[in-house]
Amino acid sequence: MGWLAVPRDWLDSLGEIARFGGRVMILVFNGRVFHFFGEALRQAGILILGSAIVIWGLTFILGLQCGIEGAYFSRSVGAPSNAGVFAAWCDLREVIPYAFGYMMAAKVGTGIVAELGSMRISDEIDALEVMGVQPMIYLCATRLLGAWLTLPFIYLAGIGVGYFASYLAVVEQVGEVSSGGYFLIFWMFQNPPDLIFSLTKGMVMATAIVLVGCYYGYNAAGGPVGVGTATAKSMVLNIVLVHIIGMMGTLIFWGANPRAPIGG
Amino acid sequence: MMILAGKTLTAVVKPPYPYGGEFISQFLFALQLCWFPMMISTIAFGFGAPGLQAANFLSLFGALDRLGGFFILASVREFAPFVTAVVVAGVAGTAITADLGARKIREELDALQVLGVDPIKNLVVPRFLALMLITGLMDIYALLFGISGGIFAEIAYGQPLGGFFATLFNNASVTDLWGSILKCTMFGAIIAVVCSYKGMNASGGAEGVGRAVNEAVVIAFLGVFAFNYVFTQTLLATNPEISVIK
């Protein structure tokens, strides 16, 4: 274990992960995954039942956080009725995508690695291949399709949960602005394209996380210990990818255009 | 988990203290794992979220020099501790769970107990102390790189940096810094206890260790963010002078 172990490890595997991810995406787009559409639906069901609540829990907590920071910040500049600006930008543009990415990486990403990794260790993936089922389609492509089917809706509901939490924090808890005044500013500082940009950000994160999870699980080696190590490694890469995608999304969507109703 | 936390705390203070060497090796291990992901994450976060978005907003008013003051609120109070916790939980925490889980599966922990070596004192305590210390110190590291992300945003808007630093140092307060570091140290304690607990209670062969890592990181995130909310709330409400913009 040296100082450069982590960056060297990434350099080693980044190209392979990109190739693996490309192959899985092609399998989804050329429609071969629809041979196993039932399995994709089952994966979608697992996502809804297992992960939705935790993701919403985290967006709720971070929505509260945005709310109190916004309330205290706008009070300190002498405009407590403008807490909605901070809450709207903080929730929609930055923090909810990050919260979603963190929880996806923690719950779904590591879950996929643990599941696929243990299948690899107990030779179940080889068994699938022997039976004539392509494991890439049956295990990875179905998971990606399941994620694409459900996650946009989980994400949108997560935004709703975050908004509700910010409202609670600003209006009910700190209580320096009336409900109507808060919502006037809050809705003025966002519009549907912002929502679509935010959704794009979240979905790119989700795709990256599912693909990285599939890669590390599919290629796990070295017994039960190997599965644990692969899970930990996938988490490291996912955290960094979430941050980089978040930054690039902000730069592309809002970098040159604030999209705020101020001035000309 | 609470029982494990209590046992760990008593084992920290009760002599003998056999955990010095293990503490140093765990500290170095966590540092070697964390420094690179932490650097990329904090620069990206500082440049994107508080940097570009706030600079967007401030540039509408022609007040880009105020970005420095905003970074005290954003980076010191919120984002540096929060990104530190996420990276430490995701990187060092998962490694601890995977390590302890592997030892549990191979029955090494039981063997230690049979030999009369207390696994909590010799394995959990050094990890607990190392993670607490490293999360507190990593907070400063995250602050440096988070603020450099803000500097990149300021440069991207073609602004001289004098105003940025002037408002930054005007608004900085010792209370903020101590609050930030204290918060991070507590995050480290939460992460260490959750991850050690999940690792030491892993069961069920190959899938067990992976599942333990999964559960550990989910619980650690929720615990850290819930604690963060309570802490920020208390800090802001009890120290009204830190939220005055100068």
Image (cartoon, rainbow, N blue to C red):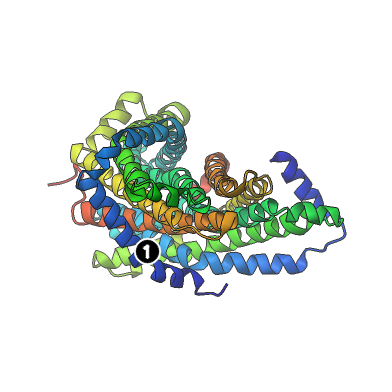
The residue lying toward the viewer, choosing from B144 and B238, is: B144
Pick the front one: B241 or B126 = B126
Front in this rendered view, residue A37 or B118: A37
- Say which quadrant the C terminus of chain B sits in: bottom left
**What amino acid is found at the position of numbered circle 1 in the picture?**
Gly
Image coords of residue B55 (percent x, y) = 29, 56
User: Quick one: label 1, few (<14), some, or many (20+) residues within 10 Å?
Assistant: many
Q: How many marks?
A: 1
The image quarter containing residue A84 is top left
Q: Residue at 35% across / 36% down in the picture?
A: A39
Question: In which quadrant of the rendered image does the N terminus of chain B lie?
Answer: top right
User: Mark 1 belongs to which subunit?
Assistant: B
Q: Position of residue A54 (x, y in %)?
A: 47, 35
Q: Residue at x 49, y 62 (%)?
A: B142
Question: Where in the figure is residue B118, as x and y percent of width and height?
Answer: 82, 54
Percent of width and height locating residue A225: 59, 57
Q: What residue do we see at 39% from left, 63% from top?
A: B43
Whether residue B32 is situated above or below residue B73 in the rendered picture? below
On the question of residue A67 being in view, the answer is yes
A194 relative to A157 in the view: left or right: left
Q: Vertically, is A182 above or below B131?
A: above
Left or right of residue A120, residue B178 in this image:
right
Q: Which residue is mark 1?
A: B149
- Rendered position, A70 above or below B123: above
